Image (spheres, helix red, strand yellow):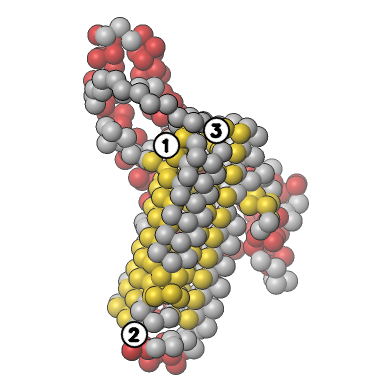
């Protein structure tokens, strides 16, 4: 198999040190570079032209899709998609459902799962980011950024998992929104929604939503009190934020189904966009499962709050149950056919997707 890749034009500086197991050779494009210590595994693995895999000690890639000109250094990449020109430095663990769009960049030792980075979003080093979507920024010099040593916590003491969103999909797709800035050594407790142009000051702990154009900082305060694991507090905010996140994912899915897939249909890059759609579906499934499990706990918590006379929490629980019973609607519909026609025309002239999106006429944005 290594010999077949070499004949195809894949560059392998030390063939004896690279392992390929049950891969589809047709999905490994000419010009890709596999550095010593790299392992490719799985029929869904895709490597684009001129992508550099495993620089700095080898990479383990299993059923992941890596786009053209990406630079993916030492780390583990499973069931994720990294589109064209992404950069991931050493020590990465990029897990199921994660999507890095064009030009997104990660520093060293970053862990992601079910996380979506829009084009040219940058994250520093030593970061834990699970169940999150981040958009924003208008250029490579004006991008949303996550500072080093930042941790996003998605898991509660009751065993529930929530997602957070920075910016949104509806506006973020057009790459014309102010960047979001999260300073280094911050802690964020999901679920939160952070608006475009917002800033979380370095060293802060954010536990609630932050509106667009606002800056937030905190010094923290020590406390000690009784803890009852069966009591849930302000579930209405958690359900409301989860429903919002779910709706944005639905919009994101519709974009790939109606714009990205038709745009690249029949091309050698098509498999990566087909896979992204599957990763989005994985995220939708995960959010539905986690929300259902959380909502199932609310009746028991509600009765305890009622018995203890916590009127505010009773109201919050009742509202949460009402919200959870409503169907989630997709927040926006676009002129998909018009957008595809425009992008196809522009990209046939050699322009990149990101470049074309930034120049998209306002009449097509809806």
Query: Which residue is the site of mark 1?
Result: 190
Viewer-nearest of discs 1 and 3: 3
Q: CA distance from mark 1 to mark 2?
A: 42 Å
Picture quadrant where residue 296 is located: top left
Disc 1 crowd rating (10 Å Cα; few below 14, some 14-19, many 20+) is: many
SS under mark 1: loop
Instruction: Name the mark on residue 361.
Output: none
- Which residue does the image show at 38% across and 72% down from the upper left? 59
Mark closer to the chain start, 1 or 2: 2
SS under mark 2: helix
Query: Which residue is the site of mark 2?
Result: 17
Disc 2 crowd rating (10 Å Cα; few below 14, some 14-19, many 20+) is: some
Residue nearer the viewer, 201 or 246:
201
Looking at the image, which residue sits at the far top? 309
Q: Are marks 1 and 2 in contact (CB under 8 Å)?
A: no
Residue nearer the viewer, 96 or 72:
72
Picture quadrant where residue 303 is located: top left
Quarter of the image with the N terminus is: bottom left
Mark closer to the chain start, 2 or 3: 2
């Amino acid at each position: 198999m290594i010999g077949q890749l070499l004949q195809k034009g894949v560059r392998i500086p030390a063939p004896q040190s690279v392992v390929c197991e049950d891969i589809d050779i047709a999905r490994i494009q000419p010009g890709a570079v596999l550095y010593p210590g790299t392992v490719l595994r799985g029929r869904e693995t895709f490597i684009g032209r001129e992508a550099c895999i495993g620089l700095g000690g080898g990479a383990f890639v299993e059923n992941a899709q890596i786009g053209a000109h990406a630079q993916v250094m030492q780390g583990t990449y499973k069931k994720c998609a990294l589109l064209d020109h992404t950069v991931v430095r050493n020590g990465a663990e990029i897990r199921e459902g994660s999507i890095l769009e064009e030009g997104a960049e990660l520093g060293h030792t970053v862990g992601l799962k079910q996380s979506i980075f829009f084009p040219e979003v940058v994250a520093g080093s030593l970061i834990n980011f699970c169940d999150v979507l981040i958009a924003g920024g208008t250029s490579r010099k004006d991008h949303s950024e996550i500072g080093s040593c930042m941790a996003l916590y998605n898991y509660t003491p009751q065993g529930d998992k929530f997602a957070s969103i920075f910016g949104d999909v509806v506006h973020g797709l057009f790459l014309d929104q102010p960047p979001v800035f999260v300073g280094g050594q911050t802690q964020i407790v999901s679920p939160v929604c952070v608006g475009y142009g917002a800033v979380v000051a370095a060293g802060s702990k954010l536990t609630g939503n932050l509106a667009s154009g606002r800056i937030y900082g905190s010094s923290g305060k020590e406390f000690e009190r009784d803890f009852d694991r069966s009591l849930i507090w302000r579930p209405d905010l958690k359900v409301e934020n989860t429903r919002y996140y779910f709706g944005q994912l639905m919009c994101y899915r519709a974009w790939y189904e109606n714009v990205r897939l038709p745009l690249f249909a029949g091309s050698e890059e098509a498999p990566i966009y087909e896979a992204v759609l599957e990763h989005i579906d994985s995220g939708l499934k995960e959010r539905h499962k986690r929300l259902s499990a959380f909502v199932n706990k609310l009746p028991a918590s509600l009765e305890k709050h009622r018995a203890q006379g916590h009127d505010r929490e009773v109201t919050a629980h009742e509202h949460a149950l009402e919200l959870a019973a409503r169907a989630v609607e997709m927040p926006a519909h676009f002129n998909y056919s018009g957008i595809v026609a425009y992008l196809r025309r522009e990209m046939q002239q050699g322009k990149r997707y990101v470049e074309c999106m930034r120049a998209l006429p306002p009449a097509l944005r809806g």
